[in-house]
Image (spheres, helix red, strand yellow):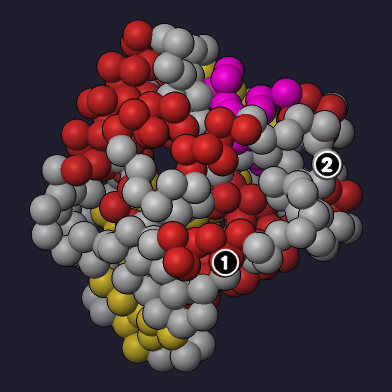
Amino acid sequence: MTLTAPPPAAERAETTPTRYVEVGGRRLAYRAIGAGRPLVLCNRFRGVLDTWDPAFLDALARHFRVITFDYSGLGLSTGPATFERSALARDARDLVQALELGPVIIGGWSLGGTAAQVFLLDYPELATHAVLIGTGPPGDTGHPIEPIFFERALKPVNDLDDELVLFFEPASAASREAGIRSHRRIAARTTDRAPMIPAEVFLPLLQENTSGQAFPDTGRFRERLTRTHTPLLVISGDHDISFPVEAWYELSRQLPTMQHLVLSQSGHGPQHQEPELIAEYIAAFVRTTPQGRRAP
């Protein structure tokens, strides 16, 4: 196993270089900014290093050492690609162990939020807190993905209009304007960019999931989640076409360590609509919530 030196704390998300760690026969690409407690972020469906809003990462980096990465076989990482949640969680685990981060705050957006839940459940000794953004709980929630998500998300290439529908609330002028600003910030990086995931890669990977559920409960995840003592912060938009906010309501009554923040007039990417606000909520949550203990 080999790894490169961590980047200086002063670097910003838009300019920080990509670094690599060789572990388990593949190369994981990652970036790190900031100083403090490590916060590892798992990415969305079709997401790579350069689909995070740099304003959100920079705001987080005022409080944490923020680590983003590409899953195996996607973006700038090598190895076999999959959307199977346990494999995505293993990517995060291998990165945490290779960088010798110790227990981390595990976070994730959308697909990454489901991977973060599996990380929390499979490697509880490595997680002090979990931050779940624009995502849903395991199993059948009774609140399916809206059809318009598939119409837009499965296009070979997404444009700005697609992004406004997928990640924001088109019915809100403020949300649309925030989406345009976020799009420009994400596009500002001009060098060392991670390649987007092509349709010939992501479409076959979708066929792995035959359950019809956004987050297949293949490992008793839902039942195990109710027994966690790890603090959970769930952040949702009030109109998320991918993971409806209502999907959490029933389970929230069984999760005493869970807090649920809902951003009004927002969609699937509330952290890109209000990057500084969401970063401050996350910092306050971690600062004021004690580390949990492992469930029996």
The disc at residue 140 is 2
Q: Which residues are magenta?
A: 231-246
Q: Residue at x 40, y 80 (%)?
A: 78
Q: In the visual, does 98 lie left or right of 257?
A: left
Residue sticking out furthest to the left = 190
Q: Quadrant of residue 262?
A: top right
Residue shown at the point (35%, 43%) measured from the top left:
158
Q: Amino acid at mark 1?
A: Pro
Residue 119 against residue 252 in the figure, above or below: below
In the image, residue 59 sits, relative to residue 11, either above or below, namely above
The crowd level at tag 2 (other Cα within 10 Å; few <14, some 14-19, many 20+) is: some
Tag 2–tag 1 contact (CB < 8 Å): no
Say if residue 121 shows up in the picture. Answer: yes
Image quadrant in which the C terminus is located = bottom right
Tag in front: 2 or 1: 1
What residue would you read off at disc 1?
Answer: 204
Magenta span contains residue 236:
yes
